Image (tube, rainbow, N blue to C red):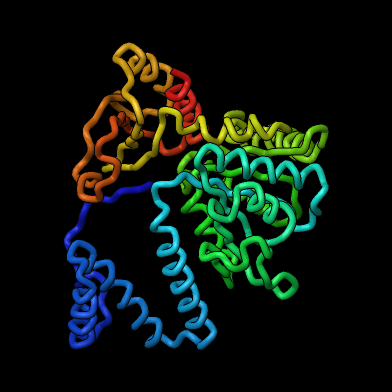
Amino acid sequence: MSDPAPQKPNHRRYRTGNDEIDQILLAVADAAERPGDAHILYEMLVSAFRMGREGLDRGELKLVNATLKEIRYAFGLFEPFQDRRKCSIFGSARIEPGDPTYQCAVDLGAGLSARDWMVMTGAGPGIMQAGIEGAGVENSFGINIVLPFEAQAASVIANDDKLINFRYFFTRKLVFMKESHGFVLLPGGFGTMDESFELLTLMQTGKHPICPVVLLDAPGETYWPRWYAFVREELLDNGLVSPADLDLVLLTDSVEIAVEEICSFYRRYHSMRMVHGRLVLRLTSDIDDDRLAELDAQFADIRTSGHIERVDASPNELADDDVTDLPRVAFAFDRAGYARLRHLIDAINAD
């Protein structure tokens, strides 16, 4: 989401402390033939060298090495699918086929794939397997965590190229968050609770772009209404969250409503990017002058200065070829009212 201004390489700021080694690492970075990014690669190499020299134990080095390899592999795997929207489906591994909640996940996967979305699940049994069954393996990613009691991925995706096996939860979570454009959570245990609160924390604090989050129950079930009651009574009523924060999620027991919530979020809104302190919202169609003025007045509370106004693609976006053909609006966002930002996106999509 953030987009710092381009900087010239400053190797004096971050070095190994050995001029000869610095020159070797500079040459290695240059050999990757990424001239605009050579300074980043150089600093990565410096970090590796310094960790080796600074006395980290073997276990710490193995952790960093495995982390980097997992991330590199995952980023490469997703690269060919960057033009496809993806929805993560979370829920219990213990829910069996034939359970109404299992069927909900099957129908959800099918509904999303029918709208040309891909799904991402944890690749295990239960809700994860159900989502893949519904979407079809060709429209699914399996983001598996290797556990002592659940080391194998669900058979439905076990032999697919879009299965990734992670050793660490934190790298697995990073990939889920980086690659997802929406999230649907079905009933689950500690893992689902972890995923729900972490996701909302990341959006509430601006560490993940605002996106649709649906809490889906089978018809007649009470899992998410009880969760919501706890959040409202213990968190909201005690001033631990803001009223608008509850609007970051939608509760429903309808698969059709869940699919529509995920997909319609991108009806006009496309994506966001922070450019030189201003938040840029990229759109699939333009907003007329009168409506733009209305939005500017309605959401003045999250502007720090100036107005919501049309802008051209920035030099940073042009350099990255980052959807430069789309219309966009920008404003000086206070970087605190992320739930209100969700309201702004909803208003843009409602036109």
**What is the quadrant of residue 164 in the picture?**
bottom right
**Residue 293 as seen in the image, left or right of residue 81:** left
Q: Is residue 56 above or below residue 293?
A: below
Please give left or right for residue 307 compared with residue 318 in the image.
right
- Tell me the residue at 61%/55% (across/down): 121
Please name the residue shown 31% across and 28% down the image: 305
| Residue 312 image offset from top left, x and y in percent | 21, 33
Quarter of the image holding residue 110?
A: top right
Where does residue 237 sit, x and y in percent of width and height? 71, 31
Q: Is residue 292 left or right of residue 164?
A: left
The residue at the point 62 percent across, 67 percent down is: 158
**How far from the left and from the top, in percent, is residue 213?**
59, 39
Q: Total of numbered circles in the picture?
A: 0
Q: Quadrant of the C terminus?
A: top left
| Residue 342 drawn above or below residue 174 | above
For the point 20% across and 49% down, which residue is it?
319
Name the residue nearer the viewer: 63 or 137: 137
253 or 232, which lies in front?
A: 253
x and y percentages locating residue 95 in the rendered image = 79, 53
Q: Residue furthest top?
A: 290
Q: Is residue 133 left or right of residue 9?
A: right
Residue 249, picture quadrant? top right
Tell me: residue 286, above or below residue 139: above
